[in-house]
Amino acid sequence: MKYIIIDADGLITNAVEWDGVAEWSPPEGCTAIESEAGSPGDSYIDGVVIPAPPPPVPEPRRLPRSPT
């Protein structure tokens, strides 16, 4: 089963496979929630996974012309 690891601010910091039985606990200050949705960088607020915004598209650069 997939579990998302959520920090105190609601940020998903990791996703792990865990059977829910083996002895394991999330890092201090974090919570593990069983969920197939969510990836590191997403947020988890009021039970809803909110995808992280896409990275900005880089501006095209013009390369200087070489002298001929």
Image: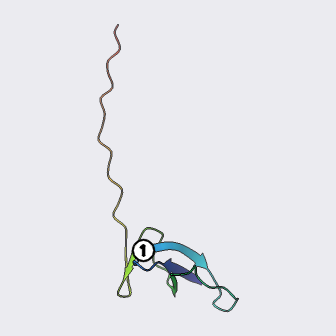
Q: Is residue 60 left or right of residue 41?
A: left
Residue plotted at (33% across, 26% down): 63
Q: Position of residue 6 (x, y in %)?
A: 47, 79
Q: Is residue 2 above or below residue 55?
A: below
Q: Quadrant of residue 65?
A: top left
Q: Position of residue 59 (x, y in %)?
A: 29, 41
Q: Which residue is mark 1?
A: 11
In the structure shown, which secondary structural element does the residue marked by tag 1 occupy?
loop
Q: Quadrant of residue 20?
A: bottom right
Residue plotted at (32% across, 21% down): 64
* Foreground residue among 33 and 65: 33
Residue plotted at (47% across, 71% down): 39
Q: Residue furthest front?
A: 28
Residue plotted at (59% across, 76% down): 16
Of the 4 image quadrants, the one containing the N terminus is bottom right
Q: Quadrant of residue 48?
A: bottom left
Local crowd at mark 1 within 10 Å, few (<14), some, or many (≥20)?
A: many
Of the 4 image quadrants, the one containing the C terminus is top left
Circle 1: residue type: Leu
